[in-house]
Image (tube, helix red, strand yellow):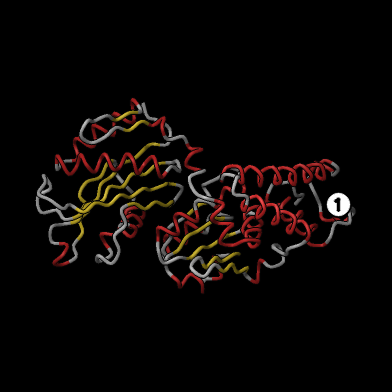
């Protein structure tokens, strides 16, 4: 009996010679894992990066599989003879960083104590079958404590608006139109924190599958990314700024600069409607008495109003599908007409 969203667990350790010759060993795995995914996971694990950076927890998505990597430094004599560091990787079908970080912490403590994956496997199976893992010394874990809605709301949309102000409307529009957003920051923690918030701007979809928060500029990962019609992709490599083939909107997070690519300028042209929505977003986010979830609700209410108007326009048309000719009959301002046309395409309300 498996709980939906939980499927695979595998472990990854550094060798005792890591400080001497940089060797890193893939020690234990359950069940099997494809060679492509293994390469991706190795590249994400900080143990393979010559000690340049140490990240206790990172997460990302590859081939529609979420991965959560927890890395630990072994600091005292333990059952892990000569091991200096190790990582635990959990893969799953659902987005819930807090859930998998909590579970991984318990599994790490078990591994340090027993030096064997057997005890971890027992705990993992208990979670799969009973939704709980209890241990006086290693802590307890309850699946029901980690509702997916909490994961969706864990970031701060107010922080995003505080950083980008009215330009947040560019991100909102790009997401509404299912465009490709690339975000760069040299610190992976900053990338993860920022990118996970962006899908809340289109709360009506509740779609975090568009999120790829930690991508490297490798053929394997880019090939997977390009299969997605629209996405939010995070990169630590500044070279991504030169890869205009990967984005419609580029976010330079350290410098707080948003750039629209030449090919997307027409679709993302701003007008009166965008200004109206932008002001609503900024006004709501700047209200000290409004929580992040209230700001998200304010944006969502406005989005639903726009979508309701779009559906009403579609209902006037043959087969309830919008055409450019039909839109022109309403004499909308050019930028609004353009936005509604592209939005109809994104929402599958456009007659092709």
Q: Nearer the viewer, residue 50 or 303?
A: 303
Considering only vertical position in the picture, is 235 above or below 209? below
Quadrant in which the N terminus is drawn? top left
Considering only vertical position in the picture, is 294 above or below 143? below
Considering only vertical position in the picture, is 183 above or below 243? above
Q: Which residue is mark 1?
A: 326
Question: Left or right: where does residue 5 sit relative to residue 141?
Answer: right
Name the image quarter holding residue 91: top left
- At mark 1, the secondary structure is helix
Question: Left or right: where does residue 29 sit relative to residue 40?
Answer: left
What is the x, y in percent for residue 214? 43, 58
Q: Nearer the viewer, residue 335 or 254?
A: 254
**Mark 1: few/some/many CA within 10 Å (<14, 14-19, 20+):** some
What is the x, y in percent for residue 303? 70, 46
What is the x, y in percent for residue 335? 78, 61
Considering every residue shown, the one lying at the far front of the view is 289
What residue do we see at 19% from left, 56% from top? 14
What is the x, y in percent for residue 43? 33, 60
What residue do we see at 85% from left, 56% from top? 332
What residue do we see at 56% from left, 46% from top? 292
Q: How many numbered discs sit on the rendered protein?
A: 1
Question: Left or right: where does residue 82 sit relative to residue 252?
Answer: left
């Amino acid at each position: 009996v498996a709980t939906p969203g939980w499927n695979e667990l595998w472990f990854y350790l550094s060798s005792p010679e890591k400080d001497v010759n940089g060797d890193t060993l893939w020690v234990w795995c359950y069940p099997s894992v494809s060679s492509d995914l293994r390469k991706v996971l190795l590249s994400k694990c900080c143990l393979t990066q010559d000690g340049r950076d140490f990240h206790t927890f990172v997460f990302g998505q590859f081939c529609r599989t979420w991965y959560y990597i927890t890395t630990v430094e072994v600091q005292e004599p333990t059952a892990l003879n000569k091991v200096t560091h190790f990582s635990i990787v959990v893969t799953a079908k659902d987005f819930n960083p807090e859930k998998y970080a909590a579970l991984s912490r318990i599994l790490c403590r078990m591994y340090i104590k027993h030096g064997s994956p057997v005890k971890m496997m027992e705990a993992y199976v208990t979670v799969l079958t009973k939704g709980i893992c209890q241990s006086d010394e290693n802590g307890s874990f309850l699946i029901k404590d980690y509702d997916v809605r909490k994961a969706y709301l864990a970031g701060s949309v107010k922080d995003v608006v505080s950083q980008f102000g009215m330009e947040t409307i560019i991100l909102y529009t790009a997401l509404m139109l299912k465009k490709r957003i690339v975000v760069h920051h040299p610190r992976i923690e900053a990338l993860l924190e920022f990118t996970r918030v962006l899908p809340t701007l289109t709360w009506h979809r509740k779609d975090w599958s568009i999120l790829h928060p930690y991508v490297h500029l490798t053929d394997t990962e880019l090939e997977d990314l390009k299969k997605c019609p629209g996405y939010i992709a995070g990169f630590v490599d500044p070279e991504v700024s030169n890869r205009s083939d990967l984005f419609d909107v580029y976010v330079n997070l350290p410098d707080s600069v948003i750039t629209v690519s030449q090919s997307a300028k027409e679709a993302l042209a701003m007008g009166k409607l965008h200004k109206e929505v932008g002001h609503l977003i900024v006004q709501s986010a700047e209200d000290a008495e409004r929580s992040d979830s209230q700001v998200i609700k304010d944006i969502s209410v406005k989005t639903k109003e726009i979508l309701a108007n779009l559906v009403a326009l579609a209902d006037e048309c043959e087969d309830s599908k919008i055409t450019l000719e039909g839109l022109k009959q309403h004499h909308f301002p050019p930028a609004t007409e353009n936005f509604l046309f592209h939005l109809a395409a994104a929402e599958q309300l456009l007659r092709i």
